[in-house]
Image (tube, rainbow, N blue to C red):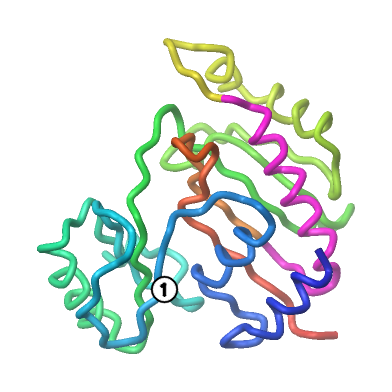
Amino acid sequence: MKAILDEWLAGLGIDCRPDEYEAKSLLAQLGLSVPCGIRLAPGVTGIVPEFQAPYVAKVCSADIMHKTDLKGVYLNLGPDNLSVALEALHTAFPDASILVEEMVASEGPEMIAGGLIDPGFGPAVMVGAGGILTEIAQDVTFRLAPLDEAEACRMLMELKIYPVFEGFRGLHLDPAPLARLLVTVSRLVDALGSRFDQLDLNPIVWSHAGWTILDAKLMLRTRP
């Protein structure tokens, strides 16, 4: 993992401030599933993605944390209205790049996972109910990083929504790959060491590709 991190850190557009495209690029290199996507420079609208519609188009900037609140996300776009959405985004955010991704079909509840620095204990990971349920349900659990797959499985079993992994209402969600995702997140948090500040993966959904990370925010600290 160190070699991957060193190369990724060296290639950041702005040191210590990865945007969503850069964060997802790192996650993909670590074996996690993210949507196919391309990052467009400010002002670029005339593109035809190599992946199939429907598309998602959203502002891509380390300075913008709450894209949806700022009307910086367009969903379920076809080839005909993608350029219209891109023009609207470039008008609203003229200095920002735009991320165009495949829109991932999913089933079951959305999940959240991530990492943080606990003031008393150090680097930690979390998992819980994600999407719009994050603030409403407040169904999350924490562990220190790094952790193994057995401990990650115990984290999932502590959640109130764990029955969704046991066939609730006909759902077929596999908790094992989600536990492995948590292990990878914990190793990333640990490997970044003093450079790490915060990681937010929300939502994570169950799709044809397994657990797929639809949005990712990674915050780093300046070099010591």
Residue that badge 1 annotates: 60
Farthest residue, direction front: 50
> In front: 132, or 25?
25
Picture coordinates of residue 93, whole percent (x, y): 29, 81
Q: Residue at x 48, y 56 (%)?
A: 215
Picture coordinates of residue 30, whole percent (x, y): 69, 57
The quarter of the picture where the N terminus appears is: bottom right
196 in relation to 91, above or below = above
Q: Amino acid at mark 1?
A: Cys
Q: Quadrant of residue 101?
A: bottom left
Picture coordinates of residue 41, whole percent (x, y): 36, 85
Mark 1 residue element: strand
Q: Residue at x 72, y 51 (%)?
A: 185
Left or right: 6 with respect to 59? right
The magenta-colored residue range is 174-198
Q: Assess whether residue 89 is covered by the magenta stretch.
A: no
Picture coordinates of residue 27, whole percent (x, y): 63, 59
Q: Quadrant of residue 153?
A: top right
Magenta: main secondary structure equals: helix
Q: Quadrant of residue 115?
A: bottom right
